[in-house]
Amino acid sequence: MAAQKWLNPKCKGRLPRGSMGLPIIGETIPFFSPHSFYGIPHFISKRMTKYGSVLKTSLVGNLVVVSGDSELNQYIFKEGKSVYCSYKESALKIMGEQSLLAYHGVFHKYLKNLTLSMIGPESLKEVLLHETDAITRKYLHSCSNYASFDVKEESANMVFEYFAKKLFGCEEAKAYRRNLRESYKAFLDGIISFPLNIPGTAFHACLKVGCENAVKVINERKPSKKPCHDFLDFLLEEAKNEDTILNEAIIVDLFVLLFASYETTSEVITLAMKFLSDHPSIVVELMKEHERILKNRGNEELGITWTEYKSMTSTHMVINETLRLGNIVSGIFKQVTKDIEMKGKFKITLRCYLVDILE
């Protein structure tokens, strides 16, 4: 009887076909198992072949509807009043009720705009382009002394060092860099885990150390009157305004979510290197493009300019193709605010999470 209820959960209307896996555990293990960077993960493609482009499953103790249907995904991407980005129960418990994850709509847009002040188009043109060029040169020079090196690891080190400096400033970045990476690894492992606060579980480790160092840096910076001209300075000044909607919990969240980007960025860089190694003719084309830019520049030691960057037609094509082919973020968890009927066949209910598969 219990098994029957698990395999056929009650809902208004009718859920799409699919499999629920084992009780509680569901199909969590195969869903989060390693998969190729190419195309749709095997877990999803195998079930879509069997059940269709929209299917049900159970992940981390929750009923989930997975969509590979272009029509439904277009509706989901609109992010209207009916659908919003969401995270698993474990993430909400870790981040708290006043965290970034608890807010949507206008408030969420406000927080995103704060982040764009550091990584938006104007900042990219005036600051980020030159800084990333400098740190890339630094790491390429360092790696040139190795007989071989791990592209993924060195890319992750480079991206993390850069964002640590942008967020926390140079001194804090040097003092806490190793502990920060350990803390954020614990955070990333715990945010999609089962919400079991038991020693030895990823969830427990995340609660204990996931945001610990970010909080420590913030608390140490608060009484300081010395400007560091980093993103933390900007947020703390913003929090002083009487009409602000920022609180310390949200400030911590912004750091956590920004730092999480270092993992995906390093994966994209690694994947680009893989694609280029498989297509030597493209490497030749890129070398010609870059050598032409250096020749026109005159002094090769000068940093890249915005005009040069915009002129890199082949380079941009490689970047766009890498993002298109890569399976870095294969799906996004969302929730619905009302029942959604799809093609008259089934209904996605309030009890469900949505995962739209990105192709």
Image (cartoon, rainbow, N blue to C red):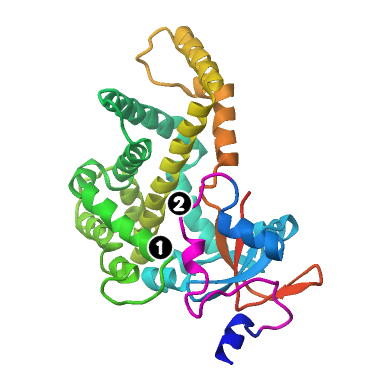
> Which one is earlier in the sequence, the residue at label 2 or at label 1?
2
Determine which quarter of the picture holds residue 269. Answer: top left
Q: Which residue is mark 1?
A: 246
Where in the figure is residue 56, as x and y percent of width and height?
Answer: 63, 71
What mark, if any, has residue 223 been given in the picture? none
What mark, if any, has residue 114 been given in the picture? 2
Residue occupying image coordinates x 41% and y 33%: 127
In the image, is 183 to the left or to the right of 277?
Answer: left
Where in the figure is residue 346, as x and y percent of width and height?
Answer: 75, 73
Q: Is residue 358 above or below residue 304?
A: below
On whether residue 35 falls in the magenta region, the answer is: yes
Q: Residue furthest right?
A: 344
Where in the figure is residue 263, as x and y percent of width and height?
Answer: 40, 47
Residue occupying image coordinates x 37% and y 16%: 302
Kind of residue sitting beneath label 1 = Leu
Determine which quarter of the picture holds residue 223. Answer: bottom left
C-alpha span from label 2 to label 1? 10 Å
Kind of residue sitting beneath label 2 = Leu
The residue lying toward the viewer, choosing from 73 and 149, is: 149
Q: Is residue 72 above or below residue 166?
A: below
